[in-house]
Image (cartoon, helix red, strand yellow):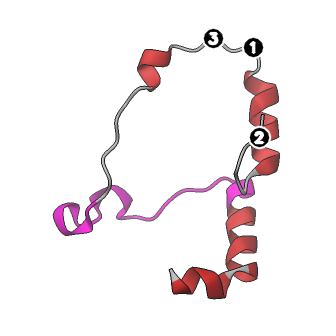
Amino acid sequence: MSTKTAFHKYVIELRQLLQNARWDEESLDRPLKTCRLGECAGTCCHDGVYLNPVEAEVLLELSTDRGAELEEL
């Protein structure tokens, strides 16, 4: 299974942890709308986001290695 992600180590850990887990697929079906800051004023992300150490490491690495590309977005 090919996965496009910057969190390769995390995906491997999750696969191992959850390989025998039972899933209630209906409970995961929660349609999410795209955020519109003009309407919500950032209330859900007001205090920032919380990252685990793996996520923080990957994002720091990406921002360092690809900072110029990200600024162009």
Dot 3 amino acid type: Arg
Mark 2 / mark 3, whichever is N-terminal: 2
Q: Which residues are magenta?
A: 36-55
Res 46 quadrant in image: bottom left
Q: Does 33 appear above or below 24?
A: below
Q: Which mark is residue 1?
A: none
Q: Dot 3 lies on which element?
A: loop
Badge 2 local density, few (<14 within 10 Å), some, or many (20+)? few
Magenta stretch: includes residue 26: no
- Outermost residue, left direction? 39
Measured in 3D between alpha carbons, the distance from the residue under mark 1 to the one under mark 3, in whole angstroms, is 7 Å
Q: Secondary structure at mark 2?
A: loop
Residue displayed at 40% across by 64% down: 47
Q: Secondary structure at mark 1?
A: loop
Q: Earlier in the sequence, mark 1 or mark 2?
A: 2
- Observer-side mark, 2 or 3, equals 2
Q: Amino acid at mark 2?
A: Ser
Q: Is label 1 or label 2 in front?
A: 2
Q: CA distance from mark 2 to mark 3?
A: 22 Å
Q: Which residue is mark 2?
A: 2
Quadrant location of residue 67? Answer: bottom right
Q: Amino acid at mark 1?
A: Asn
**Residue at the spot of label 1:** 20
Residue 68 horizontal/vertical position (percent): 64, 88
Residue found at x 67% / y 67%: 59
**Is 26 located above or below residue 8 in the figure?**
above
Residue 9 lies, in percent from the top left, at 82, 47
Mark 3 packing: few (<14 Cα in 10 Å), some, or many (20+)? few
What is the x, y in percent for residue 52? 66, 53
The image shows residue 58 at horizontal and vertical percentages of 73, 63
| Residue 35 sits in quarter | bottom left
The residue labelled by disc 3 is 22
